[in-house]
Amino acid sequence: MSDRAHETYDVVGIGFGPSNLSLAIALEEHRAKSPENEISSLFLERQSSFGWHRNMLLPSATMQISFLKDLVTFRNPTSSFSFIAYLHASGRLPQFVNNQDFFPTRQEFHQYLEWAQSRVADRIAYNSEVTSVRLPPGGVAEASDRLRLEVADATGRTSRVVEARNVVISTGLVPNMPEGAERDDRVWHSSEFLAKYRRTDPGELRRVAVVGAGQSAAEITRFLYDELPHAEVSAIIPSYGYSVADDTPFANQIFDPGAVDDYYFGTEQTREAFWRYHRNTNYSVVDDDVIRDLYRRSYDEEVRSVRRLQFLNLTRVTGVKRVGEETRVSLQVGPDAEVRELDFDVLVCATGYNTMQPTGLLGELDRHCLRDEAGRYRVERDYRIVTAPEMPCGIYVQGGTEHTHGLTSSLLSNIAVRSGEIADSLVARCAGRNAEHAVLAEVGGDIR
């Protein structure tokens, strides 16, 4: 995509993972249906190419949601961007059906995402990191109907200026590390796992540890155990073993599109009940088959009088430091137990993520964004941050809205419907703006 000074779009997406990819498709389908009301759009992504959790594309790891919860189907079952359409285009639809499985591998789903993004590639600019979102120079909120985005290229140099009447921020989650742990070549977060592993000589890994109690932690533990038959693998788990994810039919209703309304418009008691009863559908839980795989390996070691796979239950990391070529990890069992230290060649922290916070990106604009009593952004039902009356531009977020929209705020389960609601809101806002300008033009008023 060629650089042009001061490009102006109806909407600019900041970040291009699955969420904004789904939005790009929704806008593309709107354009195809109503070409006379096209919404001009651009999506900016700092990575050099599309990628979604690349470093967790472990062999045989499967999706935790049905293939029907793809980018589009729950919004438009006839879409040509569906996973079924991808399988047909790839010539694998009969084979997939014969497999009789609702859950494709993560690698295959990633291939689907890459296929979908290639079809809207003319609206994406990679190697483009948005460094600031602000009002145009000399502008004040009530006198401007657009925002100015400064965009840096791969070298970090500001190479482009883009103006947008609306922005949709979807910059992803932020890796969370245990207390006292800093990432280096021997201390990894799960978000960088495969890249770091492939740069390491497996023969040098004799003692490895994985911290965490969720799906990623269990999958990495299984992977290292299978890939390193000479190594001791320790799973450091704050709970008493892994807890199974509740994916039974009634529990899964928490991910239905209608559950967002129940949460958003519910009372505080209703919202609190959502989290109390249904955290085990997604947070710090593991699929049953992965748990059984690991237990089977552990039991087989018992039979063979081998001890290579160890589970350090009820244990938390209290510190990490480098000692020569090894990483020394301080561990505590329970709140009052004495801290002990163990040395590992590599420590993998599958300790989750912190929610997206656009505050730094918004800079001075943040003062126009309203917050609740707890200091969190107030968010409209259409995922638009509530702004002061003098701010006419729309600032939407895909992520960071668990407090307003519930469990599915940043999950794939509701991605198609969520992006469709944002697209509908953008279409309505642009239509309203055009109508207002048409009236102003008719009476001879100024048009910004």
Image (cartoon, helix red, strand yellow):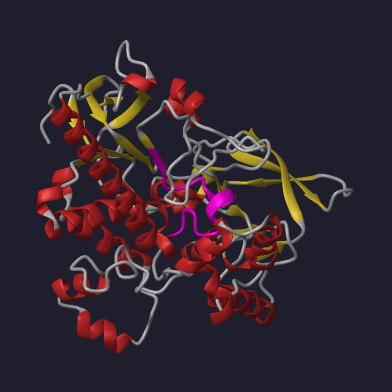
Classify residue 208 as left or right of residue 75: right
Does any portion of residue 264 appear in the rendered image? Answer: yes
Does any portion of residue 125 appear in the rendered image? Answer: no
Name the residue rendered at 36%, 56% in the picture: 421
Classify residue 66 as left or right of residue 239: left
Is 12 inside the magenta-drawn segment? no
* Front-most of residues 236 and 115: 115
Looking at the rendering, in which quadrant would you find the N terminus?
top left
The image shows a total of numbered marks equal to 0
Is 398 inside the magenta-drawn segment? yes
Q: Residue 33 in the image: x percent, y percent?
A: 14, 60
* Front-most of residues 224 and 444: 444
Q: Which residues, given as a range, are shown in magenta? A: 395-411
- Against 444, is 333 above or below? below
Name the residue rendered at 25%, 51% in the picture: 24
Answer with the quarter of the image where residue 154 lies: top left
- Against 20, is 256 above or below? below
* Front-most of residues 253 and 367: 367
Q: Residue 62 in the image: x percent, y percent?
A: 42, 70
Q: Residue furthest front?
A: 443
Name the residue rendered at 20%, 78% in the picture: 92
Classify residue 254 as left or right of residue 65: right
Q: Residue furthest right?
A: 336
Q: Residue 257 in the image: x percent, y percent?
A: 45, 66
Q: Residue 170 in the image: x percent, y percent?
A: 39, 43
Name the residue rendered at 77%, 58% in the picture: 314
Answer with the quarter of the image where residue 307 lies: bottom right
Looking at the rendering, in which quadrant would you find the C terminus?
top left
